Image: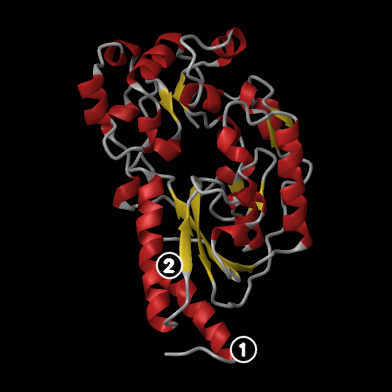
Amino acid sequence: MAWRDSNERVQLSQALKQRALEEGFNPVGIALLPGSPRLQLRTQALQRWLDHGYQASMAWMTAPRRHDASLLLDGARSLLAVGLNYYVSTQRHPRALKVARYGWGRDYHRVVSKRLRRVGRWLSTQQPGCQWRVCVDSSPLLDKAWAEEAGLGWIGKHSNVIHPRRGSWMVIGHLLTTEPLQADAPARSLCGRCTACIDACPTGAIREPFVVDAKRCLAFHTIENRDPELPDEIRTALGPWIAGCDICQDVCPWNHGNLPCSNDSDMQPRPWLLNASNQNIQRWDDATWNQKLRGSTLRRIKPWMWRRNAATAQLDQTPTL
């Protein structure tokens, strides 16, 4: 089936988004390359962030292709952006060490990539000859800015994408394509004067709205820092966090209220993550780590890093949000 005129372009765009919804993605949206002036401002902001060294040791953030999505796929004209909700009703044990919610289920890189590839193959059946490429956040794409451009939500002051009805508890993915599609309206920021995320960060990692300094971020240090010991200022502020950090999202007003909970089997938590303790983690060997983290995005944290983080963490008395 060929899609030639503007009406057929609209129909294809609607059908493509419907196909993405059938894969469990919600919200979904479309943007056109090279993007609006705001996308260009986001790109410039990335360069300023890099110039300040806020990427710490994450050298991959400097990849030139991150500045121009068209470099990821020859002839790219459109982009489908998708969100996958990872907020579940299950809560961790109140006396357990904390792991960021995005890591509770299966590796979202694999989940999102696998589902988007199915969407891409469907697109090929509708428009033979079109090219496409799947991008998750491991690809050199300005993923949050493009999600905002496609209308999935706005980038909050904590740098996460916020949907007005789903909050920021979602991972995002993109399908670049050479097919011309119908764009959705970019999202409008609704953070207003709120500074809850900035005020709550125990290390002051959110240096200013939308600017997170990885060198001060608990999530960076528990996941990416390969030093035998964490810096003193991180050790002092770590609290119960051993893998990532949700503080800035927990306090966000858009993440309170009657949020939709995911029933997706791939997003459901592994029980041990809800009841993690220093005593158990200190006994881990490589085989135990491999068994507990099989198919998890948290495999990036090596066994010795789990032991380091757990030994440093301190349980607090703050009730779970």
Q: Is residue 312 visible?
A: yes
From the viewer's side, name the closer residue of 69 and 93.
69
Residue at point 43% right, 46% down? 86
Q: Position of residue 58 (x, y in %)?
A: 57, 31
From the viewer's side, name the closer residue of 251 and 104.
104
Q: Position of residue 226 (x, y in %)?
A: 47, 19
Is residue 1 rendered to the left or right of residue 233? left
Q: Which residue, given by chain and number where applicable, does mark 1 sit on?
A: 6
Q: Residues within 10 Å of mark 1 (few under 14, many from 20)?
A: few
* Amino acid found under the numbered disc labelled 1: Ser
Query: What secondary structure is marked by label 1?
Result: helix
Say above or below: 294 vs 57: below
* Picture quarter with the N terminus: bottom left
Q: Say which quarter of the image contains residue 210.
A: top right
Q: Which residue, given by chain and number where applicable, does mark 2 sit on?
A: 21
Is residue 42 rendered to the left or right of residue 168? right
Residue at point 65% right, 67% down? 33
From the viewer's side, name the closer residue of 157 and 70.
70
Q: Position of residue 30 (x, y in %)?
A: 58, 68
Q: Say which quarter of the image contains residue 203.
A: top right
* Amino acid found under the numbered disc labelled 2: Leu
Separation (CA) of disc 1 from disc 2: 23 Å
Q: Position of residue 229 (x, y in %)?
A: 49, 9
Say above or below: 12 vs 312: below
Say above or below: 34 vs 48: below
Q: How many marks?
A: 2
How is this picture coloured?
secondary structure
